[in-house]
């Protein structure tokens, strides 16, 4: 399974990935973290383009809480385009806390693994907040 880090939280995603590694998860399950740059996605892509790219390439999008600011917002895109087989978007509930709170980061890592191990039950669930 491949996780696509939203471009504005690459630092948080790397910290989370470090926690996954330190707790042994990366040796137990096949996970990869990729960035926009690594997959050739322009960082100025709108939310709709990012969501479509992730879905088309079987990537789980890891992001923070996005709102419904315009017709291409992530929330609006999911409302309009999500299907019963769409991959969920994993949303870090508190992007600042993940930077400074080790126990919060551990809970996020555990929740991420829980969702991925049971992914078929989360298909079509537009957004899953972690922790």
Image: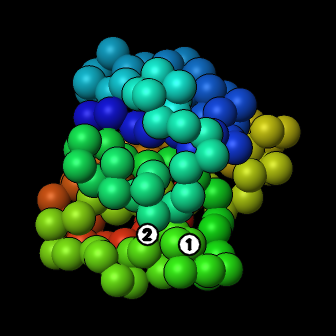
Name the residue: 74% across, 52% down: 95
In front: label 1 or label 2? 1
In 3D space, how far apart are the residues under numbered discs 1 and 2 (Cα atoms)?
A: 13 Å
Asked if one can make out residue 63 in the rendered structure from this viewpoint, the answer is yes
Residue under label 2, please give it.
Answer: 127
Residues packed near mark 2 inside 10 Å, few (<14), some (14 to 19) or many (20 plus): many
Name the residue: 53% across, 81% down: 71
The location of residue 64, given as percent across then percent down, is 64, 57
Name the residue: 42% across, 74% down: 77
Q: Is residue 66 left or right of residue 30?
A: right
Asked which quadrant contains residue 1, the reply is top left
**SS for callout 1:** loop
The location of residue 111, given as percent across then percent down, is 46, 52
The location of residue 107, given as percent across then percent down, is 58, 48
Q: Is residue 117 left or right of residue 48?
A: left
Residue under label 1, please give it.
Answer: 73
Q: Is residue 113 left or right of residue 29?
A: right
The location of residue 44, given as percent across then percent down, is 63, 46
Q: How is the image coloured?
A: rainbow
Name the residue: 53% across, 25% down: 37
- Compare marks 1 and 2 and give the one earlier in the sequence: 1
Question: Mark 1–mark 2 contact, CB under 8 Å?
Answer: no
């Amino acid at each position: 399974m491949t996780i696509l880090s939203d471009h504005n939280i690459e630092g948080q995603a790397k910290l989370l990935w470090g926690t996954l590694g330190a707790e042994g998860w990366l040796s137990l399950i096949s996970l990869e973290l990729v960035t926009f740059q690594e997959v050739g996605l322009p960082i100025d892509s709108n939310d709709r383009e990012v969501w479509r790219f992730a879905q088309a390439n079987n990537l789980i999008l890891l992001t923070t809480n996005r709102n419904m600011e315009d017709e291409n917002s992530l929330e609006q895109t999911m409302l309009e385009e999500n299907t019963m087989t769409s991959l969920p978007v994993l949303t870090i509930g508190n992007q600042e806390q993940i930077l400074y709170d080790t126990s919060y980061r551990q809970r996020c890592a555990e929740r991420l693994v829980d969702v991925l191990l049971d992914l078929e039950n989360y298909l079509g669930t537009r957004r899953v907040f972690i922790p």
